């Protein structure tokens, strides 16, 4: 008789596992704008199913919470229920024995505080705020609100020029975004529910690559009003673009010799080819925007002079300075900043790293750009040092994987301690303190590193590159009256206005801190609309592109088509574009996966498509 058997998954367990996978799909696809009370109840029920139920707070308390949330959703509760929920959840947080119970109750508490209006709407009016404004997930999550189902449908019909015209209604940089947008729009694509999110950026790339030269729309008749835009990055140029379309006279001031901001002086050519960027900027300028490059506002022209000369100002100066680590030896020769290194590449004066050992400090996308650029500049070895685990890096996973494939080494759980210098004061090594991963930081959701009981480590280096973030060069604007927040960001309203400075607006990285191209574009778009209103106009930005009628077919689950890349061994030797773009067949198949949530399903556009703004 056998004492032990090899465990094989039972049929029942296999089905349960499949159900969990399906549930994961559904969570990944839950659209923004879902009822937060309903969500809290569902998360709570899920946690309840997992607790051991040994301790009273979990066994009885979670059940009580569950009943109260159900009463809010389905019954006509007394308003005191909100206090009872809060008190019960707090008791569970304070007394439950395990993390599952504590987490479940904490989730309820967090929702109660964060979505007070939604809870009250249910209690007092028995209706849901969330579902009233439930949008198409992808459109809601694109900061610029691009009509995604619309342009995907156009791509599916092979109407790429129309797709570009449609995108430009909300975003004047379809090409740049097609190459480097971090595509937040894909995160909650409803296709997640079936298989994987649509490759929205990939389809945009196909559209711009196949659209040919698409002329810009005509500008409205001149208004006689003048606007100065400070900063020729994506944010400044987007504001300039829309304001010019509205008939205003726009002048852009840029301190570098070329326009593009961090798209030129940060993002490397192998991700966003300069030819693509140059063509796009040229197309934007073709509207008739005046540009003054090599002009630094604050030294060459003062902020006050601009205020006196123009009817309105839009400040979009980005986050252009580098942050320091504060470790000993940081000012030594051979230690450079990521911004400095990438700027030299943007200015076509790259530093020669031939045969050098490079150490990069940082774990974000900028650190990956520096790492991969250093490989292309001839470094013999590039080590990226990061104090948390590789999976905690803020860089996109594909960027980290790409860097490793090209030969970079990621040295995780190593906190930089000091830079060793030689007798001439030149950096020769980075000393690090190994870390051990610790408790989860509740605000970031990432585990914090703690010092490990292991001696310091010496990593030899010829060049050390610091890539730990960027700051905002705000001094001259502060003197002109711009209020600066902690961390250096400009204080602006969400409509981009500086309410304390008449006629001055600001947006992009200088307000949010280092963010993304599409967020800067969205800020430029909002600024254009609000400057136009401020000047007493109400111009509308619209498009005459007719969209294909939705056809519901191909309902089956089908894999997402990823964009192929050049072979790592080949691409690491040059700065040419890494991604290859879709073939006609790939674009047709991938665009055919879109569920057209603008027409079908729970999250359809309320009140119709956003055809103008
Ligand atoms: C290395 C790197 C890689 C990145 N990769 C990506 C990516 O893949 N995808 C993504 O979406 N985002 C990426 N980003 C972030 C993105 O580039 C920025 O969020 C975006 O460019 C911000 O736009 P902006 O217009 O606010 O500022 P910026 O792009 O920084 O432009 C500001 C402009 O203002 C000019 N300026 C500053 N001060 C003055 C002054 N006093 N007078 C005149 N002109 C002035 C600057 O020279 C600059 O041209 C990356 C950033 C870096 C650094
Ligand atoms: S701009 Fe970016 S976020 Fe918006 S639709 Fe395109 S890929 Fe998505
Ligand atoms: S299926 Fe299409 S419309 Fe729906 S969220 Fe995804 S991309 Fe958007």
Image (cartoon, rainbow, N blue to C red):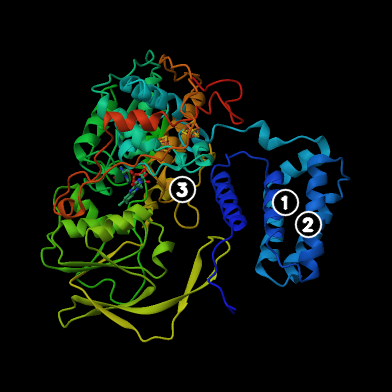
Q: Residues within 10 Å of mark 3 (few under 14, many from 20)?
A: some
Where is residue 432? Give x, y as percent: 33, 78
Q: Nearer the viewer, residue 480 or 234?
A: 234
Badge 1 marks a residue whose secondary structure is: helix
CB-based contact (under 8 Å), mark 2 and mark 1? yes
Describe residue 130's horizontal placement relative to residue 10 as left or right. Answer: right
Please tell me how crowded label 2 is: few (under 14), some (14-19), or many (20+) other residues with Cα within 10 Å: some
Q: Between marks 3 and 1, how big is the CA–CA gap? A: 27 Å
Residue 376: image tag: none
Task: State the image coordinates of residue 558 (x, y, percent, origin top left).
Answer: 43, 37
CA gap, disc 2 and disc 3: 33 Å
Left or right, 150 with reference to 107: left
Q: Is 301 in front, or is 211?
A: 211
Horizontal arrangement in the rendering, residue 563 relative to residue 605 (left or right): left
What percent of the width, then of the height, locates residue 596?
Answer: 50, 27
Tell me the element at label 3: helix
Q: In percent of the image, x 21 and y 47: which residue is there?
A: 566
Question: Which residue is identified by label 2?
Answer: 86
Label 1: few (<14), some (14–19) or many (≥20) C-alpha neighbours in 10 Å: many
Q: Within 8 Å: ligand 3 and the Cβ of disc 1?
A: no
Q: Is mark 3 within 8 Å of ligand 1?
A: yes
Precedes in sequence: disc 2 or disc 1:
2
Find disc 1 in the rendering and name its residue.
Answer: 112
Q: Where does label 3 land, which residue? A: 512
């Amino acid at each position: 008789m056998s004492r032990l058997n090899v465990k094989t998954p039972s049929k029942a367990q296999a089905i349960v596992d499949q159900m969990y996978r399906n549930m994961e799909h559904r969570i990944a696809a839950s659209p923004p704008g879902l009822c937060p009370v309903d969500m809290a109840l569902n998360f709570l029920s899920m946690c309840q199913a997992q607790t051991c139920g040994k301790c009273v707070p979990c066994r009885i308390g979670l059940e009580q919470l569950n009943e109260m949330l159900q009463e809010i959703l389905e019954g006509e509760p007394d308003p005191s229920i909100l206090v009872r929920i809060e008190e019960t959840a707090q008791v569970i947080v304070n007394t439950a024995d395990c993390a599952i119970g504590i987490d479940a109750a904490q989730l309820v508490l967090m929702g109660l505080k964060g979505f007070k209006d939604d809870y009250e709407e249910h209690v007092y009016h028995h209706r849901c705020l969330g579902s009233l404004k439930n949008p198409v997930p992808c459109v809601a999550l694109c900061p610029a609100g691009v009509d995604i189902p619309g342009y995907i449908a156009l791509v599916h019909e092979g109407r790429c020029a129309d797709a570009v015209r449609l995108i430009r209604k909300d975003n004047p940089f379809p090409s740049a975004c097609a190459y480097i947008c971090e595509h937040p729009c894909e995160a909650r694509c409803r296709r997640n529910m079936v298989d994987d999110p649509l490759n929205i950026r990939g389809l945009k790339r196909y559209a711009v690559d196949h659209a040919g030269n698409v002329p810009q729309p005509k500008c409205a008749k001149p208004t006689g009003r003048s606007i100065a835009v400070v900063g020729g990055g994506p944010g400044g140029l987007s504001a300039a673009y829309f304001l010019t379309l509205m008939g205003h006279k726009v002048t852009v001031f840029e301190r570098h010799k070329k326009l593009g901001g961090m798209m030129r002086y940060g993002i490397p050519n192998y991700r966003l080819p300069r030819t693509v960027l140059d063509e796009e900027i040229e197309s934007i300028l073709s509207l008739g925007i005046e540009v003054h490059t090599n002009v630094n506002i604050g030294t060459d022209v003062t902020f006050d002079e601009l205020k006196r000369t123009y009817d309105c100002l839009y400040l979009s100066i980005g986050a252009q300075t580098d942050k320091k680590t504060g470790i000993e030896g940081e000012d030594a020769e051979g230690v450079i900043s990521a911004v400095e290194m990438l700027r030299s590449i943007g200015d076509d004066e790259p530093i020669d790293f031939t045969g050098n050992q490079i150490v990069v400090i940082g774990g974000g996308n900028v650190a990956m750009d520096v790492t991969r650029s250093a490989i292309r500049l001839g470094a013999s070895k590039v080590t990226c040092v990061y104090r948390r685990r590789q999976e905690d890096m803020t860089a996109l996973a594909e960027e980290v994987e790409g860097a490793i494939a090209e030969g970079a080494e990621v040295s995780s759980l190593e906190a930089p301690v000091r830079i060793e210098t030689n007798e001439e004061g030149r950096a020769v090594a980075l000393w690090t303190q190994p870390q051990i991963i610790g408790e989860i930081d509740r605000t970031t959701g990432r585990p914090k590193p703690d010092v490990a009981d292991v001696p310091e480590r010496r990593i030899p280096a010829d060049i050390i590159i610091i890539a730990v973030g960027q700051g905002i060069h705000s001094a001259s604007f502060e003197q002109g009256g711009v209020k600066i927040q902690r961390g250096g960001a400009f204080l602006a309203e969400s409509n981009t206005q500086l309410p304390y400075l008449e006629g001055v607006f600001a947006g992009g990285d200088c307000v949010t801190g280092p963010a993304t191209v599409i967020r800067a574009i969205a800020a430029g778009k909002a600024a254009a609309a609000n400057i136009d209103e401020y000047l007493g106009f109400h111009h509308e930005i619209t498009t005459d592109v007719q969209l294909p009628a939705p056809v519901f077919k191909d309902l089956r689950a089908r894999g997402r088509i990823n964009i192929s890349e050049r072979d790592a061994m080949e691409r690491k030797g040059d700065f040419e574009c890494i991604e290859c773009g879709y073939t006609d067949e790939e674009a047709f198949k991938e665009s055919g996966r879109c569920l057209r949530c603008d027409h079908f399903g729970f999250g359809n556009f309320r009140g119709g498509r956003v055809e103008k703004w």
